[in-house]
Amino acid sequence: MAVYAIGDVQGCFDELQALLALIDFDPRLDQLWFAGDLVNRGPKSLETLRFVRSLDAVTVLGNHDLHLLASAFIPGRRKRKDTLQNIIDAADANEMLDWLRHRPLLHHDATASYTLIHAGLPPQWDLQTAKACAAEVEQALQGNDYVEFLAAMYGNQPDVWDSAMTGWERLRFITNCFTRLRYCDSDGRLALEEKGPPGSQPKYLKPWFEWPERKSRDLRILFGHWSTLGAYDAPGIHALDTGCLWGGQLTAIRLCSDEAERVEYPCPGARKPDLKGGSTG
């Protein structure tokens, strides 16, 4: 059996099918891990969501997946650039949204020695803390008050970890780490407004994975979200979002015991990149 981790699809269903053909994916033998952002901005979000739901796949939540849930239950959250309405209007919308609401924020496979998230981890979190924090948000999202959580999750504050935080502020910070983080400072203060490639940020910031004292440095982490970072591999770090939506590639990484092997499918692009510093929120 082969296990492949796949980067942000964002509704690029045809490219996903082409990539699966390229890796000779067999659903009877192989397993897929998706790094989140299955939907939005691309042309076929509905088809993508239905297809991934039909698989026995691992899927962590990204910011666009959470935005779909908020848009479905809080119409005021819908944006002009979204491509989500056909999901919301679909006959099987309730089943798809319920399935998405029960996806995790973090997947750790001790046997394969890989950890899958959508965006990042603040430097103060080790695996145990990250798993516990993910579980808090998952419980809120899967509980009876999930619409209240979806309404409260938007915003950039608080921006630094404090284990004493409570309530919606605590859940918002956790959600922002798992689904939006790219850069932080030496104290782990999130810089969520920075979306460009490394080198474009102020000097006091680094990519979250470059701080040498981060407590997750013993993990092998797979993540998406950062299309301007592109294909990036370093010890314990593998970036999966290679900008399919923007005319880059859709990436699959085969998770082998000793190394991760990249396969990339070139994409025509469904959107023009945001030249002011990043393509997604």
Image (cartoon, rainbow, N blue to C red):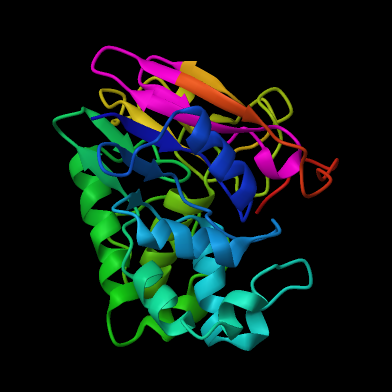
Residue 3 in sight in this render: yes
Q: Residue at x 57, y 59 (%)?
A: 39
Q: Nearer the viewer, residue 143 or 90?
A: 90
Q: Is residue 240 magenta?
A: yes
Q: Is residue 154 above or below residue 55?
A: below
Residue 276 lies, in percent from the top left, at: 84, 43
Quarter of the image for the N terminus: give it: top left
Q: Residue at x 34, y 38 (%)?
A: 26
Q: Is residue 277 above or below residue 10?
A: above
Residue 240 lies, in percent from the top left, at: 51, 33
Residue 185 lies, in percent from the top left, at: 53, 35
Q: Nearer the viewer, residue 147 or 19?
A: 19
Q: Nearer the viewer, residue 57 or 175?
A: 57
Residue 221 lies, in percent from the top left, at: 35, 31
Q: Residue at x 27, y 46 (%)?
A: 107
Q: Residue at x 40, y 41 (%)?
A: 122
Quarter of the image for the C terminus: give it: bottom right
Q: Is residue 86 magenta?
A: no
Q: In the drawing, does residue 61 fall left or right of residue 129?
A: right
Residue furthest to the left:
111
Residue 225 in sight in this render: no
Q: Quadrant of residue 121?
A: top left
Q: Quadrant of residue 112?
A: top left
Q: In the drawing, does residue 115 fall left or right of residue 242?
A: left
First to last magenta residue range: 234-261
Total numbered labels placed on residues in the image: 0
Q: In the drawing, does residue 253 fall left or right of residue 75?
A: left
